[in-house]
Amino acid sequence: MSSSARFLNASEAAGQLGVSAKALRLYEQRGLIAPVRTVAGWRAYGPDQMRRAAEIVALRALGFNLTQVARVLNGDPQGLEPALAAHQSVLESRLHELVGTIEKLRGLRGDLARGAAPTAGELAKLAGAATAPGVAFDLPWPWGGERFELGYFRPLNYIIGPLGSGKTQLAQRFAQTLPNAAFLGLDRLADGGAAARARMAADPALRSRVETALAWLVEDGARVSDALTALLGGLEDDGPAVTVVDMIEQGLDQATQEALIAHLRRRGPDARPLFMLTRSSAILDLAAVGADEAIILCPANHSPPFEVAPYPGAPGFEAVATCLASPEVRARTEGVIAWRPHATAG
């Protein structure tokens, strides 16, 4: 290795690779990567370590768990077939959606050639090929009954707002309005996850899905807990067409939250829609929001909720940013609610 080669600290290396510093530590704990140490004992990543880490990140993006990653790096193909088959299925699904979009484009061009201009709605659907149909309803308290419309929604939808903004009421109205929707409230934690475990005991298929998800999350640094088990018991239930979750981060530490959102993003663009209330910057990392995700802000002044684009300068972006806090800060304010008459705070 050249003495002039630049070495990165853990934060710099993680940022360049697009992962968390904790993920790098996990790779090290599993023996997948060995950073060098500075004289002061700090981890440092040179060109060799960065190449190795980039390979690990790429394999994770293909859907390999860390055990499978280790086998690939060691030249052992055992157990890779299921992971490759799953990745092929995701790509084929995306290809099917792309072919469908191309057909829509061909049809619109044909209409245009015949003098029939496409509507704004038809064009918007092209940009949101991986979206579900929209929803419209009258807003509940604390709004004045204004009409709320969401043209379409994505696989991951964040509902956010300050205390007392009405975000819980908005989430509940989504669950009431959308066909075959389920609402996972905070009562999922009331019995220490006993209800979720009972459902899994009665449904071996659900138990298998939860156990598989738990294995992935643990490999990404999550800590198994009653709160996580109760949450997965609802998320992995294949009955509802849409799931709405109240404060998805409740009871989960930072590492678990980071592993959870990474797991949810791996579901792909054809996953059933999920609406999540959150105020955690680990769940809603504004720098990581992708095309299959949407942010819905409930403003503090009770003006109607609206979708916020995830980039600085967009209307509502700063308001969203001020609502978010790290899991450590969120834990200190847990249980704090805004008072309001005859209702539960948002």
Image (spheres, grey):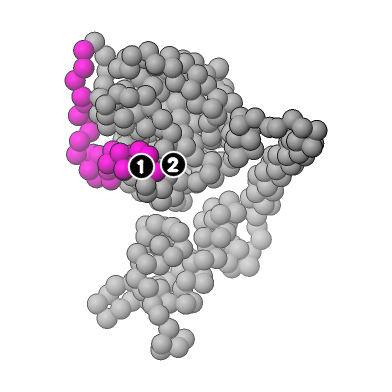
Task: Say what amino acid the circle numbered 1 marks.
Answer: Phe
Q: In the depicted view, which residue is nearer to us: 331 or 345?
A: 345
Q: In the depicted view, which residue is nearer to us: 111 or 317?
A: 111
Residue at the location (55% across, 25% down)?
A: 134
Residue at the location (34% across, 64% down)?
A: 11
* Residue 121 rendering spot, x and y as whole percentages: 61, 29
Residue at image mark 2: 309
* Residue 147 rendering spot, x and y as whole percentages: 44, 17
Describe the element under mark 2 as helix, strand or loop: loop
Task: Say what amino acid the circle numbered 2 marks.
Answer: Ala
Query: Is residue 184 toward the left or the right of residue 69 in the image?
Result: left
Q: Are marks 1 and 2 in contact (CB under 8 Å)?
A: yes
Q: Quadrant of residue 119?
A: top right
Quarter of the rendering occupied by the C terminus: top left
* Residue 140 rendering spot, x and y as whole percentages: 36, 14
Vertical placement of 321 versus 140: above or below?
below
Residue at image mark 1: 317
Name the N-terminal-most of marks 1 and 2. 2
Describe the element under mark 1 as helix, strand or loop: helix
Residue at the location (33% across, 24% down)?
A: 303
